[in-house]
Image (cartoon, coloured by chain):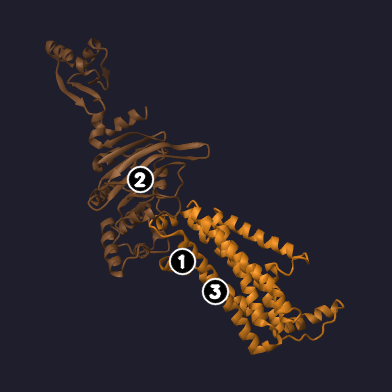
Amino acid sequence: MELLTLSHVAKGFGEKEVLRDVSFTIPEHTVFGFVGQNGAGKTTTMKLILGLLLADRGEITLNGMPVCYGNTPTNRFVGYLPDVPEFYSYMTAVEYLRFCGEIAGMTKGEMENRSAELLCLVGLDKEKGRIKGFSRGMKQRLGIAQALFGRPKLLICDEPASALDPTGRRELLDILAAAKQQTTVLFSTHILSDVEHICDQVAFLHKGEIVLQGSVEEVCKSKKTAGTELETERPEDARMLLLEFPFLKPLEKKRLLLEEPERQWEILKFVADHRLALLRMEQREMDLEDLFLEVVGK
Amino acid sequence: MKAFLKKEWMEWKRTGRMLVLLLIFALFGIMNPAAAKLTPWLMETLSESLADTGLVTTTVTVDAMTSWVQFYKNIPMTLLVFVLLCSGTFTGEYQRGTLIPVVTKGLSRRKILASKSLLLSGGWTALYLIGFGITYVYNAYFWDNSIAKNLLFAAVCNWLFGVWVIAFLVFFSTVAQNSAQVMLETGGVVMGIYLLHMFPRFQTFLPAKLIEGLALLQGAESPESYYAAMTAAGVSIVLCMAASVVCFDQKRL
């Protein structure tokens, strides 16, 4: 079942049109990576889903209900982690989570169990001080705990790993991957290796439109291979190949790139005839990063 | 709503706002009778130097009315301090983005608005009662409060004026982006009403009349002449709150 559907959504700020025509759907229990350059409109899209901004055109439905601007009832199903999370600095982490539980109408026992469980999960269980003394990374961790607190159907995270150290980032990705069992995750990022690690589905946002969308494998396969890489043992062999086959692209002294796979037999024949020492000949798979650079036209 | 009210209360306590306001209102309550009590002593001390300049001072008699005069002189200042300290109640949250996690958890904006308005008006009521109570008790101890007519009615009028100002503070908080704008706009409305109040034609029904408590105390005016201003204040409070609900529902957080 589709949990979230965006249909021809557009949003502009004054003269600037941030989103032109955005449509995508997220099925339940998937981790959906939302990729785009800085300023591509990822945060705007998320704020539209949360009813924090008014769309100029298009429709958004969450769990079968339309999202409306302002007081949207669909927020009952959502947990949100903003890009720069800010909380009441005079509260402690436990107090803040209790406050979240009270808003959600949880019982006292439920709140205490859930707080202990989540604070342990994000590594803040020993933190007794008030939030005003928290670093950005700690706020990000608390942000994840509060977003997951009410067991939301959809967890929306806006660049959740941006303020975390490498260990924290790894832990966060594990938390998001584990959360898939109970919830659906939509997270935006421009770190493509994170998407490859944990996402089932991915959408690339560029110039206000979704330029590529599908499962991570499908998206990678849909594009042609990036070419074949050749590595010789000696630099002079590489130079010889380059003289004979000028269509090869030099990458380094001993590495060359062949972008026309049908001509690889000619090269192999030349290598055999001249007894060149070939270390490696490998088909280069296009990863998300290559794909991203291709779709943004760089 | 209870959860947000609790959070607001915690904010008042832990940010020190409540303590500062409590001290100011208690000090204000003590200052009124103290100023009245000190006046004869002050005049006596100054009489010699004044005599040198040719001014002759006579014995000054003070009573509860002297203290109440001080009360009605100082109360606009305490209201101003209250507005200054509370002008960032909403805008501080917009600027820090702290309302976003709350709203995205499904808490209705109206409950947030109601909690904040309730605590602002409740805070004003409690602090006003403290200031008024201290002055009243001291006046009763030193002199006799029965000299002042319509004492409670005048106090209620003054309190209502405070609630009226708070209603505008809440309304402008749902429109403005920062606390400076809130203060400017609230101050602008109060100033505008004061200026209009100078014209005799408007005097009877403008809320600015509500702070003229002395005329009631001295018996120069009867409570009936304040009813129109009270009604006007009540109607504008209701209108302000209705407009606040509409604006806050649409507010970009």
Q: Is residue A279 above or below residue A33?
A: above
Q: Is residue B175 above or below residue A296?
A: below
For the question of whether residue B91 can be seen, the reply is: no
The residue tagged 1 is B8
Name the spot of residue A61 as percent of width and height, x first: 36, 47
- Distance from the alpha carbon under mark 1 to that under mark 3: 16 Å
Q: Which mark is residue B22?
A: 3
Residue at 66% x, 89% y is B142
Question: What shade does chain B have?
Answer: orange
Q: Which mark is residue A28?
A: none
Residue at 39% x, 47% y is A49
Seen from the viewer's position, the closer of residues B22 and A201 is: A201
| Same subunit, tags 3 and 2 | no
The residue tagged 2 is A159
Seen from the viewer's position, the closer of residues B120 and B33 is: B120
At label 1, counting other C-alpha atoms closer than 10 Å, the crowd grade (few under 14, some 14-19, many 20 or more) is some
Seen from the viewer's position, the closer of residues B190 and B58 is: B190
At label 3, counting other C-alpha atoms closer than 10 Å, the crowd grade (few under 14, some 14-19, many 20 or more) is some
* Image quadrant where residue B54 sits: bottom right
Kind of residue at disc 3: Leu
Chain letter of disc 3 in the image: B
| Circle 2 SS class | loop
Kind of residue at disc 2: Glu
Camera-nearest label, 3 or 2:
2
Residue at 45% x, 63% y is B111
- Distance from the alpha carbon under mark 1 to that under mark 2: 30 Å
| Circle 1 SS class | helix
